[in-house]
Image: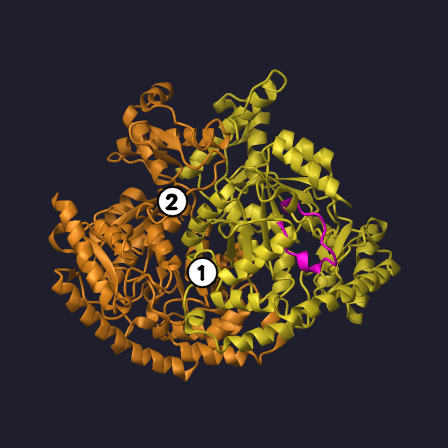
Chain colours: A yellow, B orange
Amino acid sequence: MRKPIQLDSVKDIAVRTAGRTQEVMAAIRARMANRTLAGGDRLPSIRGLATSMGVSPSTVVEAYDRLSAEGLIRPQRGSGFYVAGRAAGPLALAESEPKRDRAVDPFWVSRQSLDADQRVMRPGCGWLPASWMPTAALRRAVRGLARCEDDLLADYAGTRGALTLRRLLLARFAEEGISASLDQLMLTSSGTQALDMVCRFLLRPGDAVLVDDPCYFNFRALLRAHQVRIVSVPYTQSGPDLAAFETVLREDHPRLYITNSALHNPTGATLSLQTAHRLLTLAAAHDLTIVEDDIFADFEPEPSPRLASLDGLARVIRIGSFSKTISASIRCGYIAARSDWTEDLIDLQVATNFTGPSPLVTEIIARVLTDGLYRKHRQALHPKLSRARRETAAQLRALGIEPWAMPRGGFNLWCRLPEGLDSTRVTKAAMDEDVVLAPGNVFSVSQTAGNFMRFNVAQCGEPRFWEVLRRALATARQEQGS
Amino acid sequence: MRKPIQLDSVKDIAVRTAGRTQEVMAAIRARMANRTLAGGDRLPSIRGLATSMGVSPSTVVEAYDRLSAEGLIRPQRGSGFYVAGRAAGPLALAESEPKRDRAVDPFWVSRQSLDADQRVMRPGCGWLPASWMPTAALRRAVRGLARCEDDLLADYAGTRGALTLRRLLLARFAEEGISASLDQLMLTSSGTQALDMVCRFLLRPGDAVLVDDPCYFNFRALLRAHQVRIVSVPYTQSGPDLAAFETVLREDHPRLYITNSALHNPTGATLSLQTAHRLLTLAAAHDLTIVEDDIFADFEPEPSPRLASLDGLARVIRIGSFSKTISASIRCGYIAARSDWTEDLIDLQVATNFTGPSPLVTEIIARVLTDGLYRKHRQALHPKLSRARRETAAQLRALGIEPWAMPRGGFNLWCRLPEGLDSTRVTKAAMDEDVVLAPGNVFSVSQTAGNFMRFNVAQCGEPRFWEVLRRALATARQEQGS
């Protein structure tokens, strides 16, 4: 499928330079592999290495920049580059110490949201409060399980996960026009783990991976763990900017494009059918594989275009989970892909997880999905979320905070702050008062969303939140004024 | 901690050769990174590359062998070496097609055992039948959960997993003399996932990792996914062979040693206190980190020496799970390690799984652990397993199959087949009659256990199994005779 690099007259010089950059990168990697450079060591000076390898200093700079982007080395202000990690060399992903005062990076929002105690409000988190979840259906499913067979309580599932849930998923796919077979589908412990498996399977350190800008912040965290080069395209009201998309495909040759079409996170925008079609045409021309994360599907009042529906799981890998819509406690995800890839992914699943999700967990999900209570819950949830979006938007506008778009469903509102206020400053000020916000730049590879913020309309109900937000805006305004 | 390679007079030549081997390996890796060598491509000939790089052909052979061991390339009989994987370059771990007739590699036993239907007997699998598990306690726990709070049904756990279960684990550690704090402990989706996380954290492709020979076969599968070099030491009745251990530490500088002390898998042997002490002294001298998998702890009638108890989680990382002793359906594992490492591991958990195991799952485990029914179940299980070991051993001996040791607990019997019979042949013959066995070499890095087989005494009860085994032995005898 992928061809060796082709030299042509126009790109000759660029490619030769790229070759020399690769040589420098390989040399550094070799020294790290044979431990002449260990974690914490300083790298050779740019000028010194340029001389000894017979390349230009700018080539070394380019190589060091790329190794930094891969997380293998890190620059230290005024004193050159260092091998990442501690002396023992473990993989350190955080940008600083992982405490409350750590850098507000993609990990910050997750860890603050997940580890917050009851007193902390979380309008920056990416899930519904438990009281908005289908707990009646969940409770009925759990109650039923106390009478299930011993196997379900005590035995492993098969390597692909429980048949019942896989059949239900295939039926849902069929409704969307995706005809897939059982051997194209495997269950995973979560949606995140599904994406992680696909990345382990398809990516190698140094590969380029394309995401939307803005995108779900944990895509960035996960890709950092894979030590790949992250490139991005601006996301518009109808999907990724196609001109930018084409340029990136031509120039960066990304191995993978990771996106979520239905109710895009964080923008809430909807992919248009035309954009989907053109995007897939470009993907075919550049042999790009696409991962489409369908995690918000059940929040859509009516289904919108899906890349997987147009493509039919040829170059699109669909992943998803039920963590947002059924339960974040009873976690389960899935991967639907080409059947030969699924076969290999199962080996990877066996090696790294032994089996898929707990059979007990998949049985609960299957029971909820087929329970009339869940259908009713969904029907009631759409207008409830719609009202929350409208009310939250109105309260935000009263503070000068303007939604970038009004989503058709879901709980995310992607908003621009007033007067060029820096959302990271606002976030830090709110954290001092036990409110976790999600500042724009954690979603932005290009770091151009400093003036944006994502609000979870289902977590904005408490009056205290609005007081804290008002004060945090004032604090940021003061800091930026001074 | 780890120092760059030191040259000394004795090792000079060896180290210089190693350096040149690394150079060749780095060159090939660089070509793979910049796609001048893609999946499925043939590598340069040994003679050709030796000439062009100015090294001896034996250096190229050594480099190719190591890259093969890492899974990056693979030899093809009579036609040189090829880049592993398909043209698109995904990670292919299997040694051949993953069907019933795929090579009997470490994946074979797992996949046959997990995906077998009811009709198939599994004396080669690594778990108890559901009827031997504490299903009464499990059922009581599930029943109780139908009345739990909404949060437990629908919300995420914190990044370290539920506090209740972590506290229970710490109390158990304290009984073993391991004093650990809550920030040294995190819950994972499974024991396998715990090991996978530790490997992602500490290992880089090409690192050497030490395991026992024989060892749990999925250690081999997992390490292959990490593209590391696997080295091994023979396991004796009282732990690893310490002379071999020291030689490997000196010559291969493994980054990690992965073992399970209590009821070693597959041998059932018990680590002696002296071996534990000497092993830790050697580990300290060579700055070796140890992962001790405590998965079989609850099968021990009385506790045996643990590396973690002697070391106190300084250079030992303890992992474990409840899949063997409580439920393989309700999966949950843990990692106990240095607190600074745990902090970084949590970032890795967030990036790759978002959170730890389902709170519902950890709550069930916690309830079972504290339920008197489980205590009674364990007390009844020891004599039941003991009887099964004795009876199975007697039946095996009647067929000329001799246990290598009689374990103090658990369900594994590691046995030598009669007359130098090849256990892979026996396994294939048994598979034709729907019986999954576990032949010795899937446990053996050095491939020196071809005459051994692991039997699960709790899965050997059916008379038909013994008929099949008798016929399979006869088939192998005939094949080897001809």
In the image, the segment drawn in magenta is: A293-308
**Residue located at (73% from left, 46% from top):** A271
**Residue located at (53% from left, 37% from top):** A206
Q: Nearer the viewer, mark 1 or mark 2?
A: 2
Instruction: Decide if residue B138 is on the left or right side of residue B293.
Output: right
Classify mark 1: residues with Cα within 10 Å, few (<14), some (14-19) or many (20+). some
Residue A62 in picture, x, y percent from top left:
59, 30
Question: Do marks 1 and 2 both belong to one polypeptide chain?
Answer: yes
Tag on residue B94?
Answer: 2
Residue B302 in picture, x, y percent from top left:
27, 75
Q: Which residue is mark 1?
A: B338
* Badge 1 element: loop
Q: Say whether residue A295 is magenta.
A: yes
Q: Say whether residue A321 is magenta.
A: no
Please name whichever residue, B228 or A190, is drawn nearer the observer in this view of the structure.
Answer: A190
Residue A366 in picture, x, y percent from top left:
56, 65
- Image vertical order of residue A249 relative to residue A54, above or below: below
* Badge 2 element: loop
Quadrant assignment, res B327: bottom left
Q: What type is the residue that disc 1 sits on?
A: Arg
Residue at the limit of the structure toward the right, as seen here: A398
Residue B401 in picture, x, y percent from top left:
15, 60
Instruction: Decide if residue A415 is on the left or right side of residue B372.
Output: right
- Image vertical order of residue A168 relative to residue A24, above or below: below
Quadrant assignment, res A395: bottom right
Instruction: Decide if residue B357 is on the left or right side of residue A476.
Output: left
Q: Chain of mark 1?
A: B
Residue B238 in view, yes or no = no
